Amino acid sequence: MAAAASQDGHDTGGPDQYRRLHAASLADPEAFWLEAARAVDWSTPPVAALDASAAPLYRWFPDASLNTSYNALDRHVEAGHGDRVALVHDSAMLGTTRSYTYAGLRDEVAVFAGVLAGLGVGKGDRVLVYLPMIPEAVVAMLAAARLGAVHSVVFGGFAPAELAARIRDARPAAVVTASGGLEPGRRVEYLPAVQEALALADSTGTPVVAKAREGFVHRIGDYRQSGSCWVDWDDAVSAAEPVDPVGVAATDPLYILYTSGTTGAPKGVVRDNGGHAVALTWSMREIFGIGPGDAMLTASDVGWVVGHSYIVYGPLLAGATTILYEGKPVGTPDAGAFGRLIEQHGVRVLFTAPTALRAIRRADPDGALLRSHDLSALETLFSAGERLDTGTSAWVADVLGTPVVDNWWQTETGWPICANPRGFGGVPLKPGSPSLPSPGFDVVILDQHGTPVPAGTEGGIALRLPLPPGTLPTLWGSDARYGDSYLAAFEGYYTSGDSGYMDEDGYVFVMGRTDDVINVAGHRLSTGAIEQVLAQHPAVAECAVLGLRDPLKGQRASGYVVLKAGVSVDPTDLEAELVAMVRGTIGPVADFRSAVVVDALPKTRSGKILRKTMRQMAAGEPYAVPSTIEDPAVLAVLEPLLRPVPAE
Ligand code: COA
Ligand code: AMP
């Protein structure tokens, strides 16, 4: 992007450049994004940027074609940077570090694409990736992209039933997995989970490629007899030939990433190839300030959107070095882990979630373990995934001695809706705010009638259409569900599901969700999905699940169950059974630990549970008791159970 120029012609950077670029992106999106598209290598360069012919469904770069894997790897090799380090796998769990150059990673991806092609995977086919934080996860994603196939990565903390729901929806032509993942103190066996999920989804014939890892009980060979085609990763690679990148339309899907909505059924967020490459390339430079050769550590997981965008695609599109960290912020071995990584790999940008920062602070209140490392390479800490409280932000800024940049976004948007653009000097930081809307995002705060509210007034955060490149064009297999979920509330707007306000300077403050989505340790969960599990218990007549405030994880799910008439159970036993059911059906990631038996739930006279009122009570917000309530006394009984924990 050109340097900023003030009206008198002087370069200014910072706030002036931000305002100029943001205004330009909204006034003439066509020109803005065609200019940004020049940073991507196309097989057919775009002539037009936005296709609004099916509005409110929009598509970017309708006449262009490219290959995302080529842009992430081959392009850098062909430009003479094949020896540059693309990826460092740092496993605190194993105490190992392994680096891959761009040429080396390109070769591994090309051969693994050959493996997938040999299993019949071609353009448009789906490849389900269920892998822990090992390089094979990156290789599998880029190999699918190389073939023009569509990957769908599922986080390892989900149980077989969740995996099965994704298999049922995506209908993959192949599944890529490994023996398992390493969690502190335990090994998570993936092979039986994959087998069970395939059986649940009536897909046992789907080919499975599995990377063998040492120390796991289950072995790939044991699954060959199960009637399906299970292939050992290393054997398959040694027999495969490399495959060249396949050109795809910019509008073709690159991946599907399932995320929690308000119902139990996960939503398959679709990401296209062209808009994604353009937006991420732009964001790496202008928001994150990362260029070729810079090291970026995004301490998330490839199973989440942050991992897709800023462990895998963003850094590689930028020609940077990505650090794939298999470990935790604390306990592997201690709260200095990020400091070690910064020192050892010369990390310039660290990106993590507030929960991780709170966990570090709790374990090491003075930050002595972090400070014991040479942190001089670090320029900026980025934080996203949940609200960054000002106490944690100030603490970590002091310990690391760098700016702390909160940024707000969602699986749906793929890159920050709001952030502080460090690439052109940044804008002044305001505690509690993820700063200003990124170029291309027209953020508006609406009241319940869809009318914009004045500065300082809280409302639903909406984005005026069209959304910029890199955001979801639709949900997998259902334009109608996309429209109903996001576009139907107010014509011309995308509804984010978050509430918040904008101040006089246009800074956005995100306060929390307005729906039944909760955020536990930066992991997005649906209370509706947990309720579906609780409702299956034979003693439960009805239930509600809420996100209660948690000083470490932001929120924690808590269930309130009403027993069937005449049923008598020990509440402690029931709680243990319900906790086990949620862990077994949704997975350990739900971190569900509490289910309380109550006499009744607040309901309207027509029988609808007043979840919104309960949510407001749990958040400590003022709440109105609807005139349609069946029995107001129920609220008085619930209130002490829901009272929020004071913030730390
Ligand atoms: N595979 C299998 N299980 C997993 C898993 C995975 N990939 N990730 C987490 N789990 C399990 C954990 O082992 C834990 O299981 P347990 O109940 O047997 O202990 C459970 O899921 C809950 O995990 P989590 O909420 O992560 O809590 P934790 O106590 O293990 O760790 C933190 C706490 C703060 C260290 C951790 O939550 C963290 O690093 N959070 C940052 C989250 C993040 O980066 N989110 C991405 C959004 S940007
Ligand atoms: P996910 O789709 O998993 O990335 O979760 C998106 C949701 O996480 C958003 O809708 C917000 O509720 C929350 N979120 C993400 N980043 C932030 C942030 N910086 N501040 C407040 N909430 C955030």
Image (tube, rainbow, N blue to C red):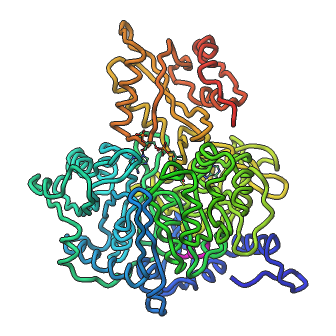
Residue at 51% in and 33% down: 557
Chief secondary structure of the magenta portion: helix
Residue at 43% in and 81% down: 101
464 in magenta: no
Residue 43 visible in the snapshot: no
- For this view, does 194 lie left or right of residue 307? left
Name the spot of residue 491 as percent of width and height, x first: 62, 53
Q: Among all residues in the image, which is located at the extreme front?
A: 372
Please tell me which residue lies in front, 215 or 124: 215
- For this view, does 238 lie left or right of residue 282? left
Which image quadrant is residue 537 in? top left
Above-or-below relation of 297 to 318: above
Residue at 42% in and 75% down: 99
Name the spot of residue 307 as percent of width and height, x first: 49, 61
Q: Locate the N terminus and report the quarter of the image it occupies.
A: bottom right
Name the spot of residue 247 as percent of width and height, x first: 38, 82
Above-or-below relation of 485 to 464: above
The boundaries of the magenta stretch are 277-283
Residue at 29% in and 67% down: 125
Above-or-below relation of 122 to 9: above
Which image quadrant is residue 105 in? bottom left
Q: Locate the C terminus and report the quarter of the image it occupies.
A: top right
